[in-house]
Amino acid sequence: MKDYKILGKGIARIDTPMKATGDALFTADINLPRMLVGKVLHSPHAHALIKNIDTSKAEKVPGVKAVVTREDSFDVHWGVFKYTQDHQLIAVDKVRFIGEEVAAVAAEDEETALKALDLIEVEYEILPAVFDAEEAMEEGAPLIHEDHPKNVNIHVNIDVGDVEKGFADSYHIREDRFSASGETYGMLEPYTVIADYKAAGALEVWVPTASPHTKAKALSNLLKIPLNKVIVRRSNVGGALGGRSDVFPLDFITATLSRKAKRPVKATYSREESMTCTRQVHDMVVNVKTGVSKTGEILAQDINVIMGGGGYSSTGPIAASVPFLVWEETYRLPSVRLNSYRVYTNKPIRGMYRCHGRAFLGGLGMQLDMIAHDLGIDPVEIRLKNALTAGEFQATGSQIFGCGLTEAINGAAAKSNWAEKRGKMAPGKGIGMGANGMMCGFPMGIRGGSSAIIKFNEDGYPTVLTGVVDNGQGNYHAMVQICAEVLGIKVPDIHIVAADTEVTTLDMGAYSQAAVFVGGNAVKNAAEDARKQIYTIAAEILSCSADELDIDNGKVFVKNDSSRAVGMHKIVRKGLLDNTPVIGRGSYMPEVSRTREWVENPVGQQAGTFSFGANVVEVEVDMETGEVSVVQATGFHDCGFPINLKAVEGQYEGSIASGGLGSGLMEEHLWDGGRMLNPDFLEYKMPLAVDMPEISANVVITDDAKGPFGAKEAGLFGSMNSFQAVGNAVFDATGVWIKDFPITPDKVLKALEKKKL
């Protein structure tokens, strides 16, 4: 590992004190003068026409200041892409899931708002509904959107090589079906929006979001307000996991209530509302046929995916593609066919997730072990045979640059004592592996890049202005560390202003795993620009050339004579006096294909770079109850170069919780038709601290040439492969494959009983 002064160390994060002391403000903690309380009326039906809405009684309740219904819609539809704009953020013609937003009120207090909601009368005409994605595709199924035959929202087709020839040439062919229920993101913070529409026509919004600039652009379109008058302010985010990336009805509704009431409005969803009315995780069925050579090289794959998307598109094309992209980022696929269908159902809307695609990535990763078992090959060996290496191209045309996948697989196997344990442990104990790549910065048009500004105050201390968002993963600290390394300034001496659309420049936010890779490059470039300006001014003061200078600890000095030095504050003040203020500017746009499109043209460079990782878990299975416990996890992550080593380790620990324990063993939605039966943290099971295993987090240093100081994405490899590692370990412990996630005790017992027959 390179020896930097600040980077690569486990430095305490700049936001730790305020979060530890409770001083950190989340959206629900913010109170504005004269602020009203907003409440939303939700549909009790999964599919119904709205015949009439009568709000006259609600409007007469003392203390009610505004009521919003479909009459306040601007007939603008939200969608991440133009061809997925199918969602009016307050129901207009009909409702498509239980919980869809139908009306809202703003009142002086919560009691009054709830009273008014009860007085709103909505006349519905109930329509036939369909809740299962496969059933929704059948002939004669109720159409949820009339212009989408068989309820297919998105169909992604990728066909590379000659799949049929690949199967004909295969020594061994295996076909399997994997499935997974939907999940909840499980953020502890209930979703809250504060909107303050000013008399001058500007809208101020506080909201937990992974992408403030995306939110501002959407509200500008939806409310027909110029973008420079829509201001999304930063507040701390109490968890994201992919669930804060979209635009939600509550954003539009709260802004519209404020606009009508001419006062600030705060609307907070209850836990039940948060778990049904923001975004949830796709349920999924995957049928995969794989052909391999005698020695285990993949020759052909045919993958069919059906995803339950809920009532509207959300991030449809991305969601339908990402599990496959992660798979092709990991293994050599000479001939592969994908047909991925995102299907409308009368359930709440589905979106992206940190552990997205457990039936896909979990299933295909488990099938790799199944094939290895069939051929008598070690699962580590079959991964190494098929693992991509630096310089190769993925199936759809992306080049791999720095790649430590092989090192990660070998490292995880060695440190976990794989060779001594796999297939050799006592009954009920097992070990399994998962591995994957992860894109860093995929095509997002103008929102795929980032820019940053570093300004200096007259005392010599800088402020970093960046659109980067921190959802808890340490992105703000990473930006400050990068700035500190370039400018030779202590981390506590740097202030950061981030994720505020009024003062920061365009950035995609915490999305596409690009905050450090893209945003960090922009900050690094801005810091280097500032350093050049500092050297120019210092050279004049010290009567030398800029090439002779270095910078450290807030001072610029002559390399060969450190006694000749000048403090940063003097340099900055001279710049101000000479009308050459030190203002660093930097930007970065990942080198991706401008012609690649999720549906129409899914070929070309799909990310600026890629990270890689391998993960080994050990489990213990109670053979009488079927309960599975993860007791040990060992991960090796090629994150290029760790900006903050402790942050990388923390991300892996979170990945084990969400991907291994949560997605692998516990988390699932339970339904009665279109009504979720467990929309709370009592009945929806998530891992607790007592469930966590012993964890060994390790890094593989590849110093990616495109990343800032060699850094790239850190964290998602464990989330996206822990469930396959758990599934493989359960087989090693029990001799049975569980092909439906999560792997709950009842499924284990059923499989064990079937094995006895």
Image (cartoon, rainbow, N blue to C red):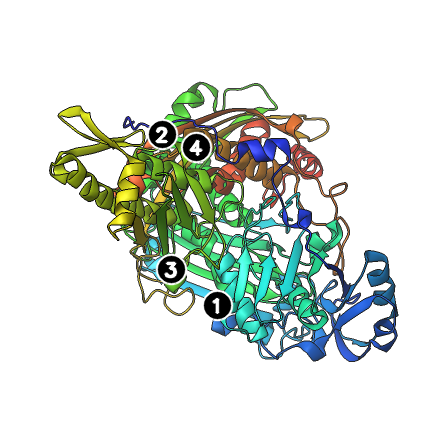
Labels 4 and 1: the sequence-earlier one: 1
Quick one: SS at disc 2?
A: loop
Labels 4 and 2: the sequence-earlier one: 2
Crowding at mark 4 (Cα within 10 Å: few <14, some 14-19, many 20+): few
Quick one: SS at disc 1?
A: helix
Quick one: SS at disc 3?
A: loop
Q: In this rendering, is residue 262 above or below 369? A: below
Could you tell me how far apart the alpha carbons at marks 4 and 1 are, in whole angstroms?
32 Å
Q: Nearer the viewer, mark 4 or mark 2?
A: 4
Q: Residue at x 81, y 58 (%)?
A: 109
Residue 492 badge: 4
Look at the image and tell me whether residue 343 can be seen: yes
Residue 228 badge: 1
Could you tell me how far apart the alpha carbons at marks 3 and 4 are, in whole angstroms?
35 Å
Residue identified by numbered label 2: 8
Labels 2 and 3: the sequence-earlier one: 2
- Residue type beneath disc 3: Pro
Where is residue 16? Give x, y as percent.
Answer: 54, 32
